[in-house]
Amino acid sequence: MTRDSHQAARQRARALLAGPRLKQQQRADRMAALIAHLDMIQTLETTLGQIVAELIDLDLSPDEIADLTEVPLEQVYHWAHVAMSSQESQEEA
């Protein structure tokens, strides 16, 4: 075996051994990014829920909010539910 082929074999062996670690690191990085996205979505959901709650406090019905925002009524109810859950959590704390 020549020096070049020996070195090439050594590099292939290192790459083979590093593969699982690299894949594991890539998987961990991807999971961290997805969790960060979920945190941002949860914050956005809470904010939208608070806005819907304020609109309801201004005597707008969920139907009116859906019509004004062109958002499906089910989504308005969801955001209102998120706001109520968030408010209950804050009151308990």
Image: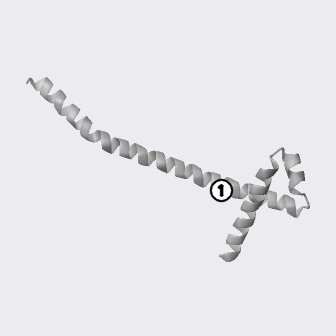
Indicate whether 25 appears above or below 16: below
Residue at point 71%, 66% (across, down): 85
Q: In this rendering, is residue 10 above or below 47?
A: above
Image x and y of residue 21, in percent? 32, 45
Which residue matches tag 1?
A: 43
**Quarter of the image containing the N terminus?**
top left
Q: Amino acid at mark 1?
A: Thr
* Relative to 59, 23 lies left or right: left
| Image coords of residue 68 (percent x, y) | 88, 47
Q: Position of residue 90 (x, y in %)?
A: 69, 71
Q: Is residue 49 left or right of residue 7?
A: right
Q: What's the coloring here?
A: one colour
Q: Position of residue 50 (x, y in %)?
A: 76, 60
Q: Residue at x 89, y 57 (%)?
A: 61
Secondary structure type for disc 1:
helix
Residue occupying image coordinates x 90% and y 52%: 64
Quadrant of the image containing the C terminus: bottom right
Q: Residues within 10 Å of mark 1 (few under 14, many from 20)?
A: few
The residue at the point 10 percent across, 25 percent down is 3
Furthest residue to the bottom?
A: 92
